[in-house]
Amino acid sequence: MRYLFRGIIRENGRAVEGHVEATSEDDAFNILANNGIVTEGMRPDPRPQAADAPAETSGAMPELAEAIDSALDSSASQVRFDDLADKFKGKNVWVIDREKIRHRVAQVVDSALQQVGEAGAAGPEPMKEIRDKVAEAIQGLFQDNRNIASQQSGQQVAMEHQVQRMAHLVRQAEATLAAIQAAVRTGGFGGGGGGGVPKRMMFHAPDHRNDQREVLLEIFKANMEMQRGIKMQGEESPAGPGEAAPPPAAG
Amino acid sequence: MAETSPNPVAGKPITATSDQDTGMQERVLLLGIDLGTSRSSIVSESGVRKTIESYVGWPKDPVSRKHLKADIIYGKAALDNRLALNLYRPMQHGVIKGSDGDGSGHEEQKKNLEAAKMLVKHLVDLVNPGRDELVYGVIGVPSQATAKNKQAIIDISREVLDAVMIVSEPFTVAYGMERMSDALVIDIGAGTTDLCRMHGTVPVAEDEVTLNIAGDAIDQKLYDLISQKYPKASLTVNMCKQFKELYGFVSDTKDRIDVMLPVDAKPTAHDITNELKAACEILVQPIIESIHKLVASFNPEFQEKLRHNILLSGGGGLLRGLNKRIEDGLVDVGGGNVTVVEEPLYAGANGALQLALDMPSEYWQQLR
């Protein structure tokens, strides 16, 4: 089990936060104490499923990748996605990409070490030079957000397009289904074939949809007549009552 | 199969709009509109619904236009700024003022038509139709609106909507509630109270009664009664309308209703309990008599069912205790059940939208 801890380093009093792997909470306290950390708080923090296989992208530095994961986990907090969606609706956003961070940090550290290794064999203080070089490389890495984040807009647009297509498809399917149902109701199917259906089955209970259709037809006819009358009246006398004057703007 | 155009014009080919292949798919937004004397409501199939006070105002002069920062003001904002506006309440008794040619001047009639058109336009704008969307609407009108009234409403609506149908208001309520058979709808608006019995078909003139006693009549009565009791109090009909909407009742309540009215510019509490009840009660008896009339002339086998299936809608449906008072009034003629619909203010517009949705698209095409 992985535990998230917060504490201070016994020697210099500096605050520290991170993860520790242990079989129980007591074990975790013991491990931290043995490593010179005074624990102030601890809680179980199981590894997220997506981060279960970091080794592949972080190449030959699995321990480094784990440390990066731990740092990311302890510095992240959960927020409601709906709130974010409301806040950034319609905008392009950059999303912190854990995979990218893990990959880039490992890459940067690796190349820094390689550079120092090539040039530093003759140097007087190889260790200090290594640390400086790595620090400089990491700083450079985090200076540009594009190194650690991915823009989501393009993907989002593609997703929205897909959703729209799906919605269109569903609408079409619904319309087809409605047409089939209407055809079945009106006896549109089964017209031929030599009487596969017994006659007694061909009697239906009165369908109230037909009543509704008649009512709608009647309303339509009444409106049609009325509007036809208006049109004819309009053609006879150009100055009909519908031709309203411009608004009474000033009193 | 091609349908012929309903209105052939000499020299033009006969085609139906539905047969004209423009190569594009038309998007349509359906609307239900309740164009009321006091308030107008609109419900869109996209789910947006709005209600505004049926007032339209144009700034009186350049100064007021500069102050109001608009060329036209609608709804409550218009009422609140009425001193700076030429204010129009274009609807009267549920129809456009003067559309019957009832004595109001020609100029006044034209202004009311323009105000009504702008009101419909504003309502449609409120539901934000898409730029490429056709807008089709069903509009509720009082059950006994004359042909001229209906014609005026169609005229102004056709300038805003791509296709329009008008339907009797109580019918839209019944349709929306799916109570098309053996039901009696009472729709109490500001200008008219409409009663309509439903028997599974489109109601005819004999199925409908329109009373001119409605919300506005209550406001006026309340104004008269309060002015009579408290002659020193300053009062307007609009204030009475607000009191009615806040406290209107016809039940036997014991709660005292005190309102603040200015006396010599000093706000003073006045008890209007009895006046408010007396004003609201002017609705009860005419409604009971009209129900009786509609029930008595109905098929005797279904009268009992009709009396027990009465729906109360419109702003008047919000008067506390009105359904109970009508039920009490029906005891002498065999009793009845009166139900206040779920959303009295939107029942008409909801039903109109339902009608618009159920209407086959080819009907709409022909009305364009």
Image (spheres, coloured by chain):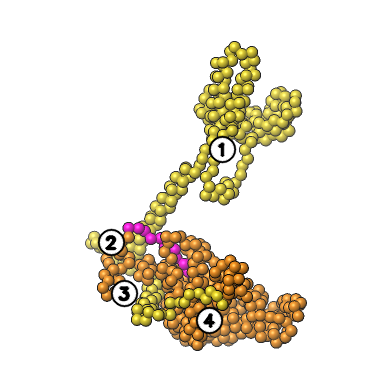
Chain colours: A yellow, B orange
Q: Residue under circle 3?
A: B7
From the image, which quarter does the C terminus of chain B lie in? Answer: bottom left
The quarter of the picture where residue A174 lies is bottom left
Chain name for mark 4: B
* Residue B179 visible from this viewpoint: no
Up the image or down, A85 lies above or below B89; here it is above
Separation of disc 4 and disc 3 at Cα?
Answer: 33 Å
Chain name for mark 3: B
Disc 2: CA contacts within 10 A as few (<14), some (14-19) or many (>=20): few
Up the image or down, A54 lies above or below B319; here it is above
Residue B51 in magenta stretch: no
The numbered mark, 1 or 2, whose residue comes first in the sequence reads 1
Instruction: For mark 2, give the secondary structure.
Output: loop
Disc 4: CA contacts within 10 A as few (<14), some (14-19) or many (>=20): many
Q: Which residues are magenta?
A: B23-37
Instruction: For mark 1, give the secondary structure.
Output: strand
Q: Residue furthest top?
A: A122
The quarter of the picture where residue A9 lies is top right
Q: Residue under circle 2?
A: A190
Q: Residue under circle 4?
A: B93
From the image, which quarter does the N terminus of chain B lie in? Answer: bottom left
